[in-house]
Structures are given as C-alpha cells and as structure tokens.
Image: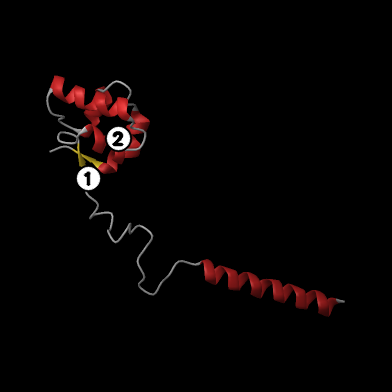
Amino acid sequence: MRNSYFSSLIFALLASFALVTQAAPPTDGQAPSSVIAGQSAAQVSRINLNTADVAVLQRELFGIGEAKAKAIVAYREENGLFASVDELLEVKGIGKTILERNRDKLEVN
C-alpha cells in the first residue's frame, strides 16, 4: 500500500515539474513578451497631443471615443498647445484613470 502511494506521489511530482518547465519563460535569448510586432517598448512611437487629429486620438488611445477626441482638439484650439501631458485633465470628460492608462503613449512637443 505504501509503495503504490509513494509511486503515485513521485509520478505527480514529476508530472508537475514537467508542466512547470514547459510554462517557464524562455531563457535562450528569445524575445521577451514586451516586444510588440517586432518593436520594443522604446521603439513604439508616441502620440503628440499638440499635433494629433481626432482620428488618431480615437484610434490609439484607450477610453477615447469620437466625442472625447473632439474635445481634446477643441481644447487645444481654444487654449493653445498643451504644455504637459497632465494638462489633458483640463479637458472635459478626461479623468485621472484615462490619463494614467494612456500616459505612456502620450507626449507633448
């Protein structure tokens, strides 16, 4: 009885180990998961709030639909160019959550 229990325990341990080694991240120089479509995070272009049009803002930013994209462009036309990405909070409909989710995609030149 103990022998079959011990054998089952060893089998379960080896099977678990085999699954863990298959699920482990590659260590042989393969590209990390942060590479997107052949580009590293540093190579992904950012969206300039001072030059982007409604279509680009709507397509590239999370949580930005047509109305919010138009509000961003209207704010820029009424108040001049954005001085910082944080100024986006002044646009009606843009809150901290939307800004934080898109901060790494945005720049101001």
Q: Amino acid at mark 2?
A: Gln
Horizontal arrangement in the rendering, residue 51 relative to residue 38 (left or right): left
**In the figure, residue 102 lies in which quadrant?**
top left
Q: CA distance from mark 2 to mark 1?
A: 14 Å
Q: Which residue is mark 1?
A: 46
Horizontal arrangement in the rendering, residue 78 relative to residue 3 (left or right): left
Q: Depth check: 103 or 61 in front? A: 61
**In the figure, residue 72 lies in which quadrant?**
top left
- Residue contact at pointers 2 and 1, CB within 8 angstroms: no
Q: Does 39 sit above or below residue 18?
A: above
Quarter holding the N terminus is bottom right
Residue at image location 36% in from the left, 70% down from the top:
30
Q: Amino acid at mark 1?
A: Arg
Query: Tag on residue 14?
Result: none
Q: Position of residue 50 (x, y in %)?
A: 15, 33
Q: Does 102 sit above or below residue 2?
A: above
Q: Position of residue 61 (x, y in %)?
A: 31, 38
Query: Tag on residue 58?
Result: 2
Horizontal arrangement in the rendering, residue 74 relative to residue 67 (left or right): left
Q: Secondary structure at mark 1?
A: loop
Q: Does 23 sit above or below residue 97?
A: below
Residue at image location 24% in from the left, 38% down from the top:
56
**Coloring applied to the structure:** secondary structure
Q: Nearer the viewer, mark 2 or mark 1?
A: 2
**In the figure, residue 28 lies in which quadrant?**
bottom left
Quarter holding the C terminus is top left
Residue at image location 34% in from the left, 29% down from the top:
96
Q: Secondary structure at mark 2?
A: helix
Q: Position of residue 92 (x, y in %)?
A: 29, 20
Residue at image location 18% in from the left, 32% down from the top:
84
